[in-house]
Amino acid sequence: MKVSAALLVGGKSSRMGQDKATMLFRGEPLWKTQLGSLRRLQPKEILISAQTDPAWRPSDTQFVPDQQPSRGPLSGIAAALSRIKTDHLLVLAIDVPFMTESYLGNLCERVEPGRGVVPVIENRFEPLAAVYPHDAYVDFAGAFSGNDLSLQSLVKKLISAGKLSALQVSDDVRPLFRNLNKPQDL
């Protein structure tokens, strides 16, 4: 099953003190590391979701501006879902560089028609390394009209609606979800 992929880079990086996308990680900018992982999965298309079109964005990717008003990753995922040409969207946040294409590929293999998959660690969803069905766009768009803008709440609703399956993350895989928020995380 072919999927689209979106790299989420819309954050302000306020805790990091500099743009996470251009920070060096293991000798190369984070955007290059994450984009490389997505490319190796050979998605039908790659979207870069951000508030503004990044200067580093490669020409073979599409820029997708966050839906306004910006509500963090909720806005980025909604915008990407509204533009994909496939039935599923694999999302990957810029600040989880330990994630492997092998794990992401495993997620993609678990999707079903109309249903994506979201990893779970100790009853907490990991929605920034997950696969969403195109049909979830309606739910993301609807979240903007309500008071609850929590991605955790929305994922719970998508699971209840049968649009997502939860995948428990084993202890040996948990380090893949480590994210970089502050300089000491490096």
Image: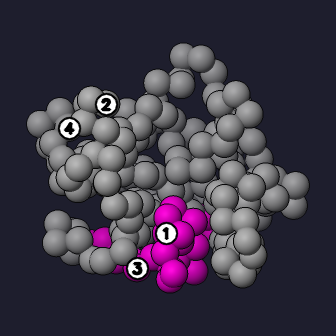
Residue 78 part of the magenta segment = yes
At numbered mark 1, what does the secondary structure look like: helix, strand or loop? helix
Q: CA distance from mark 3 to mark 1?
A: 7 Å
**Type of colouring:** one colour
Question: Which segment did they paint magenta?
Answer: 60-88
Q: CA distance from mark 1 to mark 4?
A: 23 Å
Of discs 2 and 1, which sits in the foreground? 2
Mark 4 — residue?
25
Mark 3 — residue?
65
- In the figure, residue 149 lies in which quadrant? bottom right
Query: Label 2 amino acid?
Result: Asp
At numbered mark 3, what does the secondary structure look like: helix, strand or loop? strand
Q: Residue drawn at (66%, 77%), measured in percent from left and top?
A: 144
| Residue 185 disc label | 2
Tell which circle, 2 or 1, labels the residue nearer the N-terminal end. Answer: 1
Tell which circle, 3 or 1, labels the residue nearer the N-terminal end. Answer: 3
CB contact under 8 Å: marks 2 and 1 = no
Q: Nearer the viewer, residue 138 or 133?
A: 138
